[in-house]
Every structure is written in structure tokens, then in C-alpha cells.
Image (spheres, rainbow, N blue to C red):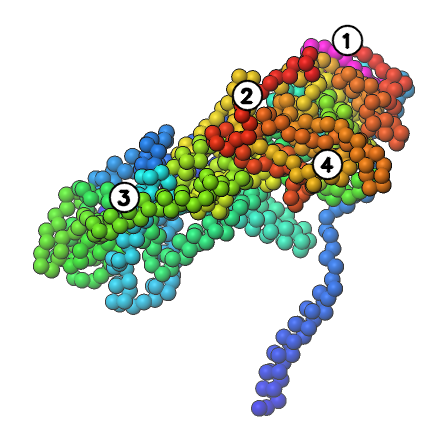
Amino acid sequence: MDRRDFIKKTGKAVALATVTGGTGLLFHNRVKSDYEAIIPKTKNFEVPFDANLPGITLARNEDHLAALNGSLDAIGGIKRFIKPGERVTIKPNVGWDRVPEQAANTNPELVAEMVRLCLGAGAVEVIVTDVTCNDPRRCFLRSGIRKAAEEAGAKVILPGDDDFVKTDLGGELLTVWPVVKHFIDTDRLINMPIVKQHSLSSCTISMKNLYGILGGRRNQLHQQIDQSIVDLANFCRPTLTIVDATRVLLRGGPQGGSLADVAIENSVICSTDQVAADSRGAEFLGLSAQQVSHILLAEKSGLGAVDYRSIGYKEVV
Amino acid sequence: MTIKTVINIRRVSQVLFFLIFFWLILKTNFEVNFNPDNLSEVILPYPVSIALEFSPLVALATLLANGTVFKGLLWSLVILIPTIFLGRFFCGWICPLGTLNHWLSAIRSERMKRKGKKRILSNKYKKYQRIKYYILLASLGAALLGTVQVGLFDPLSFLARSLGTVVLPTAHTAANAVLSSVKSIGWPPLMAGAQFIYDTISPLLLPFRQAHFHTILTISFLFIGALVMNRIYTRFWCRGICPLGAMLGIFSRFAIFGLEKNEERCDDCQLCQMHCQGADNPKVGEKWHQAECHLCLNCQSACPQSSLKFKFFPNQIETKTNPAGTPSVDISRRKVFLSVGSGLALYPLLRSGDDFEANANPLLIRPPGSVEEKDFLARCIRCGQCMRVCPNNALHPTFMESGLEGLWSPMLIPKIGYCEPTCTLCGQVCPTGAILELTQKVKVGDKDTPPNRIGTAFFDLGRCLPWAMAKPCIVCEEWCPTSPKAIYLKEETVLDSQGKEVVVKRPYIDPGLCTGCGACEYACPVMDQRAVYVTSVGESRSSKNQILLQRKGIKQKTADNN
């Protein structure tokens, strides 16, 4: 064996040994980094307070679109909330595989009208999305919301795995949870709940509707329902809350099913204060806000006024 | 038209029918952009069950077992009647599994490296090809007494089941895994490229949600095994196993179309033997087996001397050196009796055990609209279409939950997915009527008619939060879809671990209202083993498997008696 031969033969073995040892050292005790985004801040989409305008308005009209427009105009009109060029996300309640008459999901006509109003005010994009309980395909289909919103020009998103980002909600109870990015990565958020009875939280209106921005272990939130609702409402402060009380689900909530449980109220509430909106909305269920612990806790946490008349309440008939 | 053109037409036909079949399986799916006219009665846009309805074997076996040719199964005559005149054209021209086997057999393998006589002999008629007749006759024997087992080996059911529960879901997992590992590299152009490819294929191939099916390994073993065998014998499945091929072989006994051999022209080159798909001995000097021939026409195309020709009323005169073709099947009468007999014996063997009724598995929750178990087993072909179409991934192939007899038949696993009360898709796609098509009204029920029930929910009090842990919860009540709710609440004061009084709402079940949909079990936050669970008792289809003396329609609550 000559020197050349020796170098050639041992060289290969040394090279493999180096790579092997190097790989071991390189990956030794390596902590895999989490490449998912964590956004650690409160999302506040609110508009500035205006002392000349009411903080909460309610319009009653058998023509539901007129009710919406009446209520909205009384609180300052769409232009107060949506500026040209803004991106808007609308959060209706699309929780269940139910048709509009059953009053388990937000009235699709109202959602569509809101999409049209936002686009009319110059919004560049309007997204309608929700994390449903039942299968999203069926919920968005049978609620009529997908069709109505798409025809009005919205982009309807049925959240898939890609749409969630791990987010620090910064709450007392809720910390890092998967949140649908369209509720964070937007300029304006409009919450469009429907008024329904709920056996644990008494009622589900606007703040409880925010459960729908979350993915993950949502079914465990009930264990501390008041604090989790308040944490969410504190994290995610909508530009405007529009409460659909055209049909109200009095019993069998939040899914309903029987038309006998639905009351026709033909009303739409607009509010810049979530707590006030829920406080007024609860009255449709025959509840006083004093009976609803999460609404009281929300006021205590500084999220708004239980006494909705104190922020200026206007009814339009 | 030259024989080469005919061969090309056959290839086009094979590709076309394979794609149609695959497309129908893909469309057995609740698509995101699906926009039916009638929101209260959601009907699939395509008659996807047609993919299974062309099997004469399924039609015959279910006819023997339950006395009817169910709905679309009459389409199978479109295959069977021409077969009587032509022979097994289905196998060579249409069958999607046959086509798959055909393609896989063409892949280079050890078998092709054999030289000369060895190679020719390996493609001659072999005795193992009789197995398919035994399988056919045994499964028809079993069907005669009322247990339908043909679905295990019927090529259409076999392929639909394998694609729907194994191939497509694993492709979905694979696509997700590739995408996420490419994304973890973190180089933006690569990530964007991978996302683009994913987004392009996903509307076509990947359903809205990744499906996870029970016992797919057992299904995949048979499927992979069938495909791999092509490396050892050309179209092993079609030649040796397929009971539909066997049935069509038997039905081609009086075929007026067949192979005519010209003895003078043959120079014994053996090319016909080499290219034969069915191993039916097309060569001059060998006895041609009509029942084995797939009518692929490769022999005629391969013959350089034009000594082979398929034609109507072929001249098949026996000479000393060239035996005439045989229309009969190569099994003795004794074997026929033995096969049918063992099929008949299968029935008491399967039913006298305890799986069927005596000790039926409480977790065997059949899909809504299923007929009673006896009739169900006389219909279900385990094609898996109900499982594929279920939007909630609720339906799964059984392993041993309905005994060996019901292997791979559908069961509902509420922990994975519950039955959506207003959904009737599984009944829409069932080709044999094992699951009847319900309307939403019939499924949900009203004050005069009881709803369709698939089971009843029970609480496991030791695991339930308000019952055992002094914690509020009632997610089950929130999710209960019946109206009024079958889960009702009672406020009770309990002590927590600190001795403090806590008021909780404890859930109870009203079995008269519960439909067994499993939404409560699905939503229960006790993740590993749920604190509320459904068993099959109370199912509408059974007269014995009940709790209550009397079952009524839904009592409607009105505003004044609330």
C-alpha cells in the first residue's frame, strides 16, 4: 500500500466518521423551535367615542333590512365605522346546522346587507367567517349565510387548519389559543350575534359569540364560562356589535330546532359597547342583565356598561 | 378497422371507465362549494352509487339473500346480458380494478426476466384459477341462506372500499405531511411552491376534512396484497380470486363470440401466450378456455401470422393437434357441490356464535335508516360509500364489532364524529338498501312520528364534571340537537374539595327523546374516554334491542307549558 492509496482509503472512512459525529453533535439536545406565530397583544378595533351619538340603538321593523339600516343610521351610519380602503371581517353566529327560521344562526339577510353596506362604504375586502360547532359545510350552507354573503360580495371562509394562528389572548384565564387569523389580521371587526337562550350562561348574545373566533379545546371553556367570555371580549373588541333580534330563540338554545321556541321580534341593535348590547339583548329573553353573571363580570372588568341607558340609548320604530 | 385500432379503443375504454369510477368515488363527498337548491333536503348532486350498481354479482347475491334487486342494481343487467353473448368483456374493457391490475402487471418484474419456455409456461392456464369459482359459489351459497359476503371480493366494492377508506385518506395525510415538512424548511419560495401545488390538487382530491377511519390497516393489507400479486402472476386477482370474473365466466357459456384459430398459419411463435391477460390458452394446439378470457384481444394483436381471430360464431373444430375451445368452466360437479355446500355451512357457523344477536356489541351503532341487522347483513356489501360521504367522519368500517360476518360493514363512532340530525347522505349513496334513504322529516320526526333512532346516550357519572368533580360543564346539553332536548338539567348543591357549597347543573337523559346521534359524546370535554357515550339500544331498526315499553313521537313544548 502506498501513501496515496492509504489517504484515499482512510480518507473516505474519516469523512463518514466526521459527518456521523458532526450530525450527532449538531442535533444534540436541540430544542425544536415553534415556527407558528404568537401575537401577544389585544386587538382593539373600536372607533373613537362620540358624545353626540348614542352608544346603543335599537330599531324595530318587519322589514329586517330597514331595521338594520334604521339602527345603524341612528348610531352614526356605516361611514362612522368603515373607512375607504379598509378590510372588514364580519363575525355572524354560524354555530349550528340549522335553517334561518330556527333562529340558531344570525339572519343571513342581515349579514348580506352588512356586507353590502361595508363594500358601499369603500371596504376593499369583506370576510365572513366563524368557527362552527357542527360541520362548517353544513352550517354555512343551511344557515343560508354562505350564499347570501357571497352574493353580496363577501369572501366567505370556512376555517381550515391553515386559518388558525396560536395567539396569546392575554386573559386572566385564556392565554395561548388558536385563533382564526381573519379576526386578528383585519382593520375592522363587526360582531353580528343572534339572541339565544343558553342553559349555562343564561343567554348567548355578542360576547359569547366570540367563542367562535377560537379553535382548540373550546368544549372546556364551560368550566369557567364567565371568565372565558370576559377574557375573549377583552381581547377582541369589535368596531361595532350588531345584535340580530329579528328572531329570538327563547328555549332549547343555543341550537333550537323547534319553531315553537322562536319569538319574532323584528329588532336590530347596534352598539359600540358589547356589554350594553348584551344587556339590552337579554331583555328579549325576559332576562335582566342583573341575572346574567357574565354580563356583570364584564362590566366589573371595565368592558362596558350594564346600564345601557347611561351611554345613550335610542329606539327607532 | 385493424386489430391495433381495436386494441387502442380498448385502452381508451379502460382509462375512461377507470376515471369515471375514480371520479364517482371522489364525488361521494360533501363538497365545500356544493350549492343545492333545497336547503332543508340536501341531496348529493351526482348519483354516485351507480359506481357499485353495475356489478351483477352484487345484484345476484343480494337477490338470493333478500329476494329483491334493489333500485339501481338493475343496471347490472347492462353488463350481464351482453356478457351472455360476448363473454367477459367487462374484465378486459371496463372493470376499474381489472384495469389497475392490468397496468400493474405491465410494470417490469422478476416474472418478465424469465426466458423462453419458462416464461411461456408461467402465463398458461393454471389450476389456481379455479379458486375464484369456489369463492363465487361459496359466497352465493352463503347468500342463499341470508349472509352477503360477496362485497369482500366483488371488485367494485373492493376498489371503492379501498380507495375511499384507505387510499384517499392516506393520500390526504401524506399531502399534509409533505406540505408541513416543506414549510418547516422555512425557505419562502419553496413554501409558496408547495402551497401552490397543495392548493391545486386539494379541491379535486382532498375532502374538506381529513378523514380518520377505523381498522384501515386490515383493509389495506388485502388491497396491497391484491396489487402486489401482479408481480408474481399477471392479473392474479382477476384470474384467481375475482368472484365477479367467475360469474361472468359462467355466464359466457353460451357466448356466440369467441376465438377462431387457424392451425395452418400458426408457426408456434408463442407471442399470443405471452401477451394473454386471462391465461386462457389462446395458442393453437392448446385448449382455449372461454370462461377465462377477458376479451382483451392481445393474442389476436400479437399474432404475426394472423392465425387468431375473434369473431361471432367462431369455427372451433377439434383436430388431432388443435383441441377445440371449451365454453365450460374447469371445475368438477363435485367441487361445485362442495363450494356451495361450504357457503351454506358458513351461515350457521357465523350465526350460531354470539356476535349476531345473543351478545351483540353495544357499540355497534349502525347508520341512520339501516334496516334490521338480519336484513342488513343480507344487503351490506362493505363498499364504504356511506363512510366516505359522511360529512362528520362518523361512519367507520367495523373490525370485529359485528363479528367476522360483518367485517368492514359500517358503524358509527361518536367520539370521532356524530350523526348530524338533518343529514341523509349515507342512505342516498347505499347501493343495496342496507341503509334506506330517509327524508329529513322522517329522520328528525315530528309529534306524530318518532325520529329515526340509532341508539341511546348514557352518562358515566364517575367521569362527568358536574356529577363527580363539582364543576360546571353541560356541553352535552348545549349540543343535544333534539327539540326538546333529550338531555335535561337539574340544579344541585354539592361540596367541592374545600368543603365549599357549589351549585352545579347535572345532566340527565330522557331516553324517550334521545336519538343516539352521539353529538353529546362527540362534544364531551373528557377527551380520552367520554363521560357520556352512546350504545345501540333503542335503535329504531330493532324490535328487540330496546329499553322503553313504549316509544312516542316528539312531544312539542309550547310557550304556555314551558
Res B467 label? 4
Mark 3 or 2: the one toward you: 2
In the rendered structure, which amino acid carries the disc numbered 3?
Leu
In terms of image quadrants, where is residue A127?
top right
Q: Are marks 3 and 4 on the same chain?
A: yes
Residue B66 appearing in the image: yes
Is residue A59 one of those drawn in magenta?
Answer: yes
Please, what secondary structure does the residue beneath circle 4 have? Answer: helix
Front residue of B49 and B59: B59
Q: Residues within 10 Å of mark 4 (few under 14, many from 20)?
A: many
Distance (Cα) linking label 3 and label 4: 61 Å
Residue for badge 2: B552
The residue under the point 28% across, 47% down is B341
Residue for badge 1: A317
First in residue order: circle 2 vs circle 4? 4
Relative horizontal placement of residue B342, taking residue B381 as reference (left or right): left
**Place of residue B361 in the rendered image (x, y in percent of width and height, measured from the top left):** 51, 41
Q: Are marks 1 and 4 on the same chain?
A: no
Distance (Cα) linking label 2 and label 4: 29 Å
Mark 1 or 4: the one toward you: 4
The stretch in magenta equals A54-68
Distance (Cα) linking label 3 and label 1: 76 Å
Residue for badge 3: B248
Position of residue B204 relative to residue B219, above or below, is above
Q: Which residue, as the protein is rendered here, is positioned at the far top? A: A317
Q: Residues within 10 Å of mark 3 (few under 14, many from 20)?
A: many
